[in-house]
Image: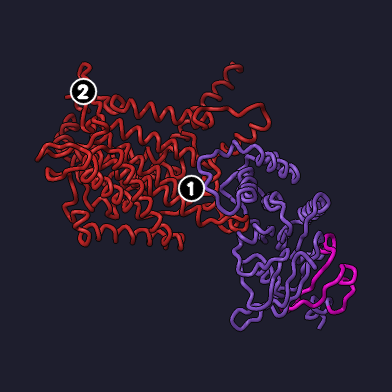
Amino acid sequence: MGILEVKGVGKRFGGLQALGNVNLSVEENTVHAIIGPNGAGKSTLLNCLVGKLIPDTGSVMFDGQSVLGRKPHEINQMGISRVFQTPEIFGDLTVMENMLIPCFAKRDGAFRMHAFEQVFHEKELIEKAEQMLDDVNMLDKRNMHSASMSRGDKRRLEMAMCLVQEPKLLLLDEPTAGMARADTNNTIDLLKEIKQKRDITMCIIEHDMHVVFSLAERITVLAQGTPLVEDTPENIKGNPKVQEAYLGESQH
Amino acid sequence: MTDQTQNPSVAAKPARATKTAAPSRGIFGLNAKDTTLLIIVAILTMLAPFILNPFPEGSDLAQFNAGYPDLMQRFVIFGIFAIGFNILFGLTGYLSFGHAAFLGVGSYAAIWMMKLLTLNVIPAIIMSIVFAGLFALFVGFISLRRSGIYFSILTLAFAQMSYALAYSVLTPITGGETGLQLKSTDSPLLSNLAPGEIGRANLFGIDMRTSYELAVGDWLFTFNAGYYIAALVMLIGFYVSIRIFRSPFGMMLRAVKSNQQRMNYTGLNSKPYTLAAFVISGMYAGLAGGLMVAMDTQVGPERMFWTASGEVVLMAILGGVGTLIGPVLGAGLIKYMENIISKINSTILHDWFAFLPDGLEDAVVFILYPFIGKGWHLTLGIVFMLVVIFLPGGLVEGGQRIARLFRRKKSDDAAKTPAE
């Protein structure tokens, strides 16, 4: 039994069946990629996992508990962190503050009225945040206004913010979308490094096959809202069904 | 005045804290910079009777003096109102257009405490905070279901409803159009009033209206008990607001303003944070309302009118939204203009420009006349536009720019010196 079990999930938007009958099992401490052509339902599936959308049918179990009907902050507190397609950070705040917020969320839960304590007294959390920033080579930028950073730095910061919470499952929605090749390679190295350093399960949605085959241990191919195959990267590469799903139109 | 929250000051402190031996410690649990700010504000408010009365009595400029009790009280009371408003608007970005409702609720609660229980202002002020807080909890719970312009409209609607209720339907409680004031028929439980005596607000026997006048040469300085009590309350309110700004809670409120989506996906529930900020700022408004009653022992429904809500928005923006000291400066500037510019009349203008040739004098007075007296709103409007266009960060940004200018000059001089 995997840490994330998706069973029979379907989602319909009006006349469009975005997800058909999706079954997916993500094993603990693996990197699982979900690939598929545009409109295959990858993002819809991801949104069903984090509470942004509620599927019409099926169940989503994480760590033995259902996530359906829970709010995004509750799902995060269960141990799922999400990296967005365009980096979502607190642009008005400094890098250090961006790091401290997830630290507080992890320690104090979804809401705590700590209005009379002072941020600069929280030495333990500050050290933890600094450690994480050091891990992603951003310690020198800790006092920077985060909105003024490059897109690549924002992406790294967002990952650091997710990782500092020590999630059991990290969901990445096209983490290298719109990146230059060098940045893409840096991101791959960063993710590999993270994987080596700690026990973490990752679920990656990605278009870039280079990224997928560099990282993934299991791959699920989605097409038209249903999983086509689930297999190891080696087998996926040679699978004719996958070739057809991806390249079908251009061959005809 | 370099207290903009965008500064990395919050993070800079902890970073230094772990790298070097100890952070630069101030007192009251604040860092050194905030302590300095608090002490400066404390000194300025305590010396206000001197600072606001720079011109000798009887001189041409005496009408610019603002050191009389009534106006000084208004400075600090509206300062409290604006500090509280800034905790909501400055930190979370939720623009409430109905904060005067909480001011009004606080005022009504306070006057009823004085009518029924005691003329001591402390219970009155406490009740004004409690009632305003409860009302803010109710209004906030409903209004915060929406954000942006819809939130603003909802708060505005609540405030106008409160105004309408106070004006007519709730007349038995609010006194309707004429409002409430202390009367000779009131007999507060704990205060021994002679029959027919109209009570006066006091603090353990100190009458709010007691003033001590000090004449030095041509100058006349007035020290008013009510002002000093209100100023002390404002300093406490200011201190609490600094603590909130620098707390994890304050950081979360800024996160609400910055990116609610990221906040929710970081495991934080933004709703209770925003509601807490709304209630806290409503309590500040109630405190201001209670203090108003403590000073002049009267209240009318116009205190809840939407223009009063709009005024506090102007104060925050004029002074600098999201800065610590900005709203206080904005409140001071608006109340100063309201009271000083509105007092200037055409005779005074003619006096000033008497040195000009007759025709020119009339022309200048003709041009300036719409901006003075009852036209002070026009002046305020122009100042407001200039600030928003050229100093989006308000007076605080203006101060920072001037400070930077001086610093650059200094460093330029320093760079030149060795070359010479």
Three-letter residue code for mark 1: Leu
Which range is magenta? Answer: A212-241
Q: How many marks?
A: 2
Q: What residue is disc 1 on?
A: B91
Above or below, A56 relative to B323: below
Q: Among the chains, which one is purple?
A: A
Q: Position of residue A244 (x, y in %)?
A: 82, 79
Q: Does the rendering let one see residue A193?
A: yes
Instruction: Indicate the chain on which mark 1 is placed.
Output: B
Q: CA distance from mark 1 to mark 2?
A: 41 Å
- Quick one: B407 or B85, which is closer to the camera? B85
For mark 1, does the 10 Å Cα neighbourhood hold few (<14), some (14 to 19), or many (20 or more) residues? many
A60 left or right, relative to B333: right
- The residue most toward the left is B196
Q: Dividing the image into 4 quarters, which one contains the C terminus of chain B?
A: top right
Q: Position of residue A184 (x, y in %)?
A: 77, 56
Q: Among the chains, which one is red?
A: B
Query: Residue sitting at 22 percent across and 31 percent down?
Result: B207
Q: Position of residue A2 (x, y in %)?
A: 79, 66
Q: What residue is disc 2 on?
A: B213
Magenta segment: does it hold A113?
no
- Quick one: B407 or B112, which is closer to the camera? B112
Above or below, B401 relative to A147: above
Above or below, B201 relative to B104: above
What colour scheme was applied to this rendering of the protein? Answer: by chain
Above or below, B302 relative to B61: below
